[in-house]
Image (cartoon, rainbow, N blue to C red):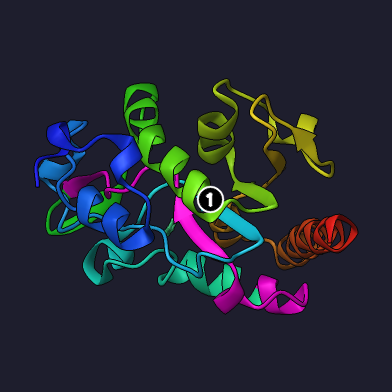
Amino acid sequence: MSLFSTEATEITSLRKLRDAEAQCTRCPLYRDATQVVPGEGPISAALMLVGEQPGNDEDLAGKPFVGPAGRVLDRALADAGLDRSKVFVTNAVKHFKFELRGKRRLHKRPNAYEIERCRWWLDLERAIVKPELVVALGATAARSLLNRTVSIAAVRGKILEAGDGMRLAVTIHPSYLLRIIERADKEQEYRRFVGDLRMCKQALREAA
Ligand code: URA
């Protein structure tokens, strides 16, 4: 199936979406990545988490958030009382962007063009899953979902209403926690992250 012959309206299930994503050539990132990393989770998920892009481990596994950042996310979700198997987990950009340093593939931030091109897939995921609440993990996801750059500090801790009726919360990306060296700071930021996820859980309960 060629992506160019696939109308968005034909993509009505997560399986069709995964098949179409696997053919994606909407930006050059598909060329160097091992594979596309589609979102994962139940179609009935009330909560959708959106990260930045797959990392090295995710690129190899074909699944989102299975590497070091994923382990932090799993722990934080559990501490917030959220069951990952009931959450739809995805990324703003579906292919791994990296630069080679010797044999190592080092993460490179997706640029505005790549985020913009990949929003097509994120919009389809939202249209199919219809989550009650979307959580942007970090600035790239927030930018994709709000279509503008935002400072996380300015929007954190509240539920935003986006133009198309989407309810959105913005928090840090879990990889930020991996970069904090000082133990006390790390612990404090981790607790704040769990607090943000708890607020999302509460917002879901209030919407139910
Ligand atoms: N970081 C992300 O933003 N997404 C992943 O899937 C893994 C790490």
Q: Quadrant of ligand 1?
A: bottom left
Q: Secondary structure at mark 1?
A: strand
Q: Is residue 143 visible?
A: yes
| Of residues 143 and 48, the one drawn nearer to the viewer in this rendering | 48
Residue 152, position as x, y percentages in the image: 70, 35
Residue sitting at 46 percent across and 55 percent down? 90
Disc 1 Cβ-to-ligand 1 distance below 8 Å: no
Q: Amino acid at mark 1?
A: Val
Mark 1, residue position? 50
| Residue at the image position 58 percent from the left and 55 percent from the top | 49
Res 92 → quadrant: top left
Indicate left or right for 3 with 114 as reference: left
Q: Above or below — where is 163 with respect to 170?
A: above
Q: Does the segment drawn in magenta span residue 88?
A: yes
The answer to whether residue 201 is magenta is no
Q: What is the magenta range?
A: 76-100
Q: Is residue 59 left or right of residue 89?
A: left
Residue 185 percent across, percent down from the top left: 76, 59
Left or right? Give the position of 105 relative to 182. left
Residue at the extreme right: 206
Label 1: few (<14), some (14–19) or many (≥20) C-alpha neighbours in 10 Å: many
Q: Residue at x 59, y 43 (%)?
A: 138
